[in-house]
Each structure stands twice: as C-alpha cells, then as structure tokens.
Image (tube, rainbow, N blue to C red):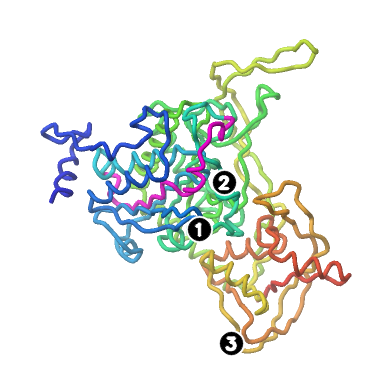
Amino acid sequence: MYKKSLISLLAVCNFCLAADNEIVFTESMISIAERTNYERTSTFAEVISVIDVLEERSELVHRERLLITEDGKDVPILVLADPAVSTPQQADESGKPVIYIQGNIHGGEVEGKEASLILMRDILFGDKQHLLENQILVFVPIYNADGNDNMAAGSRPSQEMSPVMAGERAAHGRDLNRDGMIVEAIETAALYEKVINRWDPDLLVDLHTTNGTWHGYSLTYAPSYHTAGDPATSAYTADVMLPAIQQSVKQKFNLDFGWYGGFDYRDWPPTELRTYHHAPRYLVNNMALRNRMAILSETFAHDRFYKRVHAANVFVEEILEYTRLHGEEIQRINREADARTVQRASSTQVIENGVQFEMIPLEETLDLLSYKYIPYINDAGDTEFARSSEIVTIENVLNFNRFEAIKNSSIPNAYVFPAEYSALAAKLRQHGIEVETLVEDETLRGEQFLVAAMEAQRFPLNSHQNNVLRGEFRQAEVDFSEGDYRVSMDNRLANLIFYLLEPESDDGLGFWNFFDGSLVSQLQSGNDAVFPVFKVQP
Ligand SMILES: [Zn+2]
C-alpha cells in the first residue's frame, strides 16, 4: 500500500528523501509558518489542511473531536500509534504510556501549534518515526482555536515582532489556563472528558511562550508542582526527567534550556529566580493532583519566531526520546502514586494534607543565564538600567521552585452534601470524579466548617472575585437523607477531590465562588455560616 511503503522507505532516511532520492513531503504537509519563511502563523483552517493530509496518507493516525467551539470550529485530537489505536481500551491493552502534547492554550502563543505540525509530519513521514516505538502520542495542536484566529498586530506586546499577526490569549474572555478547577470554558470541559479522563495520559506537555523576562534561555520549563498531590510524580519530573532532557538538548542542539521563572532586574545582579504558582487551576499543576506527570514549556518571547518554533520542536522531540526509553518507569511511578492515594482512605489515623502553600527555594542554588543589565544614574539622579546584548552567568541564585504547605486540613473518609447541590455533583463529574447518592437516611459523624469571613482576593481571575474562606472546623453529627450526595476518598483522584472541596483550599470550589450564594446569605442573617460540604471522619 502507498501509505505503508512510504513509511518503510523512510525508516532509514535522514534527510526526508527516500532511498532513491524521491522527495516524500508534499507542499500540503508543509506548514504555513515554514512556507512563508516564518512571516505568518497558521490559522485554524491552515492547521486543519495539514492535519487532513497527514491523516489521509498515514494509517497510524486516529482522529477524534475535542469540541466544536463557540465560533463553530471542529477542534481535532490526533492519536498517533504504531500499530494504530482507535480506543483507550486498545491503548491500555498495548501497555504503552500515553503522552499528550498540547499547543496554543493561549491563542497568541503559537509556537507549540507550529512545532506540533512539524513533529507529527516528521514522525509519520520523516526521520522521527522511531518516536512511535513504545508509546502512544496524543496531539491537540490547536487547543484555543477561537483565540488563535482572533489575530491582530500587537497582541503580544512583549514579544519580538515576528510573526506580526498573532491570536489573542483568551477564549471568549476566559484564560483557559486558569480554568482547571472551576471548569467554565467548554474547552476545559471537553479537555477533561475527551483527553484527560478518556486517554488518561501519563504525561501532559503544555506549550507556551513567555511574556517578557530577559533571561538567557531559548526555552524554560517547569514540572507539575505537587501542592496537595502525591509528590513522586512531580519529583521524578523535576529531578530526573527534565535535567536529562536539558542535557540532551544542550548536547544535540547547543541550546540552553532552564527553569521557568522571573526576577527583578532592578535588583541587579538578581539573587533569586521565582517560578509562577502552585495552584491547580493551571493545567500542568492539575495533573499532579491526578497522579500524572506534566511539563510546562515556555519558549523565549524575544527570540525570532523561527527560533522559538525550533526550541519548542526540539524540546518536545527530546521529551519523546526520553519517554520512549523510560515509559515503563513513568507508568510505574504514576500507578504507585494511584495505589498510595487509594490506600490512604483505609487508614485509621487522621492524615493531613496542605490546602494553602508558599513558594520556597531549593537547597541547591543555580547558575542563572541572563541578559546583562547596566545600571546608570539618569539626569534626574535616579538609578536606571540599560539592557546589554551580552548573556552572562550569575552564580548562586536561589531557585524558588518548590512549594510548602502553610495550612493543612485532615483528609476525610468521604465528603457528603445535600441533594439540592446537584450542580456540585455535576461539577465534580466534569473532573471525572465518581459521585454516589445515599441509598437510605443516615446520621454521619465528622467535621463541619463554620465560615467566619470570606476574604476577597485583590486580582480578579477570569472575571471572578475569588474568596479565601476563613473559619474553623467543629465536630458534628448531621442527619443526611436518601438521595444526598457522597464522594468517597477511596479513589485515585482523592487529592483532586480534597483540593476542590476543602473549604480553606486556596484554589477550591469555595475560592471560585461556588458556594457564595449560600454563604453570603447565612453571614448576612447573622447566623453561623455552615460550609455545605460535610467531612465524614473514620
Ligand atoms: Zn501561556
């Protein structure tokens, strides 16, 4: 067959020429970025036209629908495997890990989208076919499809001006990378249903581009910060996998990749590098609560477009080179984290877990690459800085790249809430969490949270005025009725359930205003405001 013979010819090809020097790429496989010498980035329709050709000519591609967006775009999921798989059951039976590559969550950060198109083509028809050994690859090259097509000049103000036109960050006003807990965007709901819960990837790679810091790296990365999750998945990503990939990129491509973070150049030379946030509203962090690994990738906004795409491309390639060889280890670590999470529910002792966190430095300092800043006194007598074009190494920089709990709470056996909160049951099910109903009336012993104050946060997130709830737990015996809801913690998603439902959680449903209606009216009436989710204790 045409498709198969091409692939077997290409197995030994280094320069995308078959044995008889026949060129195997057709124009339709070459992305718009490549065809325009990186003057343009692909529209949604241009992404689809490349994907259509790849799918038509290869037997190794299975295509599914992620969603139809508000603007009517039919966003694809591409599953690449050899032999091909068309169901999660087949993926499971193959025993191979599933690696999920996601581009364009922020519509203006287009490098992951372009790199995904190049990489899928090179895997299917070029010299990267071996990346389908031992693993199944799921690609969503254009996650925020509507944001991508809302292109304008100047939509990326801190970025080197290529391409001139790029999409907008949000999808219809929502930042998809702040929606991981409250799940209000149809994109997030679809991602959980069609990718995360359906294909259960062992590793998620989320592809971004930075917004401004002039560090000296072609690309920066972060693991999934574990917050209240099992620490093993994050520790392996940060301590084993990412350092190995960083080294192989340096050896093969002579590119410097390093830890994601920012610093204040006005304290030149910087003494600390600080990463972003631990909260699971960010999809990469959300994965740790699911006992799965994740990598945040940020190409450097001040590089030219072609260099940014190259950096994203080789990063994903080297991640896949790593996972091809270490897939079993990754699966084992994830499954062991699942088992520990489930086993904890049968403990007779009270176990606590963090609900609020602060950023801390690693013991080991780092040598930071940065563009050099030159301090000077301006005409008004104040200190200012000019940025030079020289990259320098700053030694002994504190690497604020971990989080530590500053507030804990006990892990219950189960959470129970009244039947009137059917919207809460539906919200939990969107995350893939099993919710049961009580089959008879029951009196349950455990803990109730009395809300004393709702501390409004200063900066709105996705149009929310978020609240951190303050108050205290008290022991209680409460009557529940047949039909009320129960969420068991005997579940591999128990860490996610905990973070969603703990009243003091700094990124739970309470923080996202889910209970505001009930709590505000209780507080206004002068009564104790009882958090509606009850904790059943052993
Ligand atoms: Zn981003």
Point out the residue furthest to the front here. Answer: 71
Q: Position of residue 159 (x, y in %)?
A: 54, 29
Q: Is residue 51 left or right of residue 277?
A: left
* Residues in magenta, as a range: 130-158
Q: Mark 3 to mark 2: distance in Å?
A: 43 Å
Q: CA distance from mark 3 to mark 1?
A: 31 Å
Q: Which residue is mark 1?
A: 291
Residue 180, how many percent across, how many down? 57, 55
Quadrant position of ligand 1 = top right
**Label located before the other in sequence (2 or 1):** 2
Mark nearer the N terminus (3 vs 1): 1
Where is residue 336 drawn, in percent x and y? 46, 61
* Residue indicated by mark 2: 170
Q: Amino acid at mark 1?
A: Asn
For residue 135: magenta?
yes
Question: Hey, what amino acid is under mark 3?
Answer: Val
User: Outermost residue toward the top?
Assistant: 379
Pick the front one: 489 or 210 = 210
- Checking the image for residue 43, the label placed there is none
